[in-house]
Amino acid sequence: QLQLVESGGGLVQPGGSLRLSCVVSRFTLAYYAIGWFRQAPGKEREGVSCISRSGGSTNYADSAKGRFTISRNNAKNTVYLQMNSLNPEDTGVYYCAARGSDCSPSQTDFRSWGQGTQVTVSS
């Protein structure tokens, strides 16, 4: 059973930054693409970013481009999401998920999910 654990969420003021971490266990991270998703209150879950197995390919939602950076350290079994210039619309629960292939635009292609970490952007 794959296990993913997110951390790094919290309360931040508009314009601030957070770095989320997704630590994986019980599998070799290098074999999996990792996606970050978020769910805002009252809204459907949406994709934020994804990184390929090698780390050589990344993609971002339009709302994240230029502000968020996804990266991975396979040796540490960790994927990061650096979030800068945060605004209240970034508020939500952030999840990481694993896919045993490369990135996909479909959430259903990601079979293993973490429990999420709350990000709140508010003054």
Image (cartoon, rainbow, N blue to C red):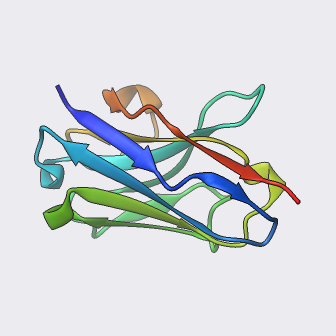
> At 57% across and 52% down in the image, what residue appears?
9
| Between 118 and 74, the one nearer to me in the picture | 118
Q: Where is residue 50 in the image (x, y as percent from the top left)?
A: 42, 53
Q: Position of residue 87 (x, y in %)?
A: 79, 61
| Between 51 and 116, the one nearer to me in the picture | 116
From the viewer's perspective, tell me whether residue 41 is left or right of residue 64: right
The quadrant the C terminus occupies is: bottom right
Query: Can the viewer see residue 71?
Result: yes
From the viewer's perspective, tell me whether residue 75 is left or right of residue 95: left
From the viewer's perspective, tell me whether residue 57 is left or right of residue 65: left
Can you say whether 106 is above or below 81 in the image? Answer: above
Q: Where is residue 55 in the image (x, y as percent from the top left)?
A: 27, 66
Q: Position of residue 10 (x, y in %)?
A: 63, 53
> At 45% across and 50% down in the image, what residue appears?
7
> At 19% across and 63% down in the image, what residue appears?
76
Query: Can the viewer see residue 52?
Result: no
> At 51% across and 56% down in the image, what residue appears?
8
The quadrant the N terminus occupies is: top left
| Between 100 and 83, the one nearer to me in the picture | 83
Can you say whether 30 is above or below 26 in the image? Answer: below
Residue farthest toward the right in the current orientation of the protein: 123
Can you say whether 75 is above or below 98 in the image? Answer: below
